[in-house]
Amino acid sequence: MIVILKKNAEPQQVELFTNWLHNMGLETHMSVGENHTIVGLVGDTSRVDIESILALDIVEMVRRIQEPYKNANRKFHEEDTVITLCSGAKIGGGHFLVMAGPCSVETEEQIISVAQSVKAAGAQALRGGAFKPRTSPYAFQGLHEEGIRLLLEAKKVTGLPIVTEIMDAQHLPLFEDIDVIQVGARNMQNFELLKQLGKLHKPVLLKRGLCNTLQELLMSAEYIMAGGNSQVILCERGIRTFETATRNTMDLSVIPVLHQLSHLPVVVDPSHATGRYELVPPMALGAAACGADGLMIEVHNDPEHALCDGPQSLRPEKFADMMEKVRAIRPYADRSFTTSQDAGSSL
Ligand code: PEP
Ligand code: MN
């Protein structure tokens, strides 16, 4: 349920109102926007009498929210969420951020060389896997602690914030200095892991599962947000369909749909979505034009010898070329779909 307050609502009366709700066992989330102040109610709202709320002087409108996700819902929080990384780089609300780097951290030379080239091309965060979710137990599983250490070394050299995947909540102490914790597609519904990430105060990049709906993705974001961590970045990385020409199927319409449903930033990963390096630049451009808030791109200095995902990794020169085109297309990105055509109302 959301309660929209009148513009001139007295702060004292607002406090009395929210205290009254807390006494009923409800949590409240205030979102002060340009046009409205919205009080979002989380908990069992079935006993809340809408008429008695409407009777209050400070209240303009009350609405029940049908969707099961509340904190992640745009109805709770009209304006885009903007997340700021340690470097000052931002994502969301018109800020575009590219995270790039190898699928896996392999050696110090590799990660530092890739970090330097993606930074020079305009990436604002370095990605790299230290814990790898591989289909085969015989495939390279990542360098684990050593991989994290090398990522932090690359951060020291370049200043780029680090994005890396966690697979087990027990590894959290190793992630203390990591800037953005990635939850991979295979762990999107690892609810115990999501709950642990909800206790942190750092951004989480949540990838859509291979066979999950957008509502399920938003419910997973809700798990993190319900714990108090509102810094969630949604990531579309393609889903499994009957098509075999590409590794997964990338549906660009999820970008405007997610932006309508949620205020959280939306990133697109065309590397895992297509599985083929030559398809990455066109799909990245498509995502930028559709209003994505950022991209996650796999880049490797020697893709032929990469220990993981070489066929979908761009060489640094190709990445730099793609970045130039992305910059050129960004001013044309269409975000008009986030507002309703009905005059005067964006709710
Ligand atoms: C990755 O980013 O390297 C990765 C394993 O991605 P996903 O979880 O989307 O497969
Ligand atoms: Mn990969």
Image (cartoon, grey):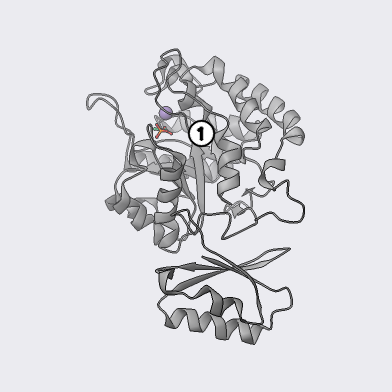
Viewer-side residue, 247 vs 149: 247
- Does residue 176 appear in this view? no
x%, y% of residue 152? Answer: 46, 45
| Residue 223, percent from left and from top | 39, 55
Q: Residue at x 51, y 26 (%)?
A: 250
Give the amino acid at mark 1.
Answer: Ile
Q: Secondary structure at mark 1?
A: helix
Above/below status of 119 relative to 200? above
29 to 106, vertically: above or below? below
- Residue found farthest to the left: 137
Q: Left or right: 272 with respect to 339?
A: left
- Can residue 217 be spotted in the picture? yes
| Occupied quadrant, residue 96 | top right
Q: Which residue is mark 1?
A: 112
- Residue beneath the point at 62% across and 41% down: 293
Name the residue nearer the viewer: 14 or 200.
14
Q: Nearer the viewer, residue 263 or 150?
A: 263
Q: Residue at x 58, y 57 (%)?
A: 75
For ligand 1, tell me if the residue under mark 1 lies within 8 Å: no
Ligand 1 appears in which quadrant? top left
Q: Quadrant of the C terminus?
A: bottom right
Q: Would residue 346 appear left or right of 49 to someone viewing this image?
A: right
The image shows residue 49, relative to residue 12, as above or below, that is above
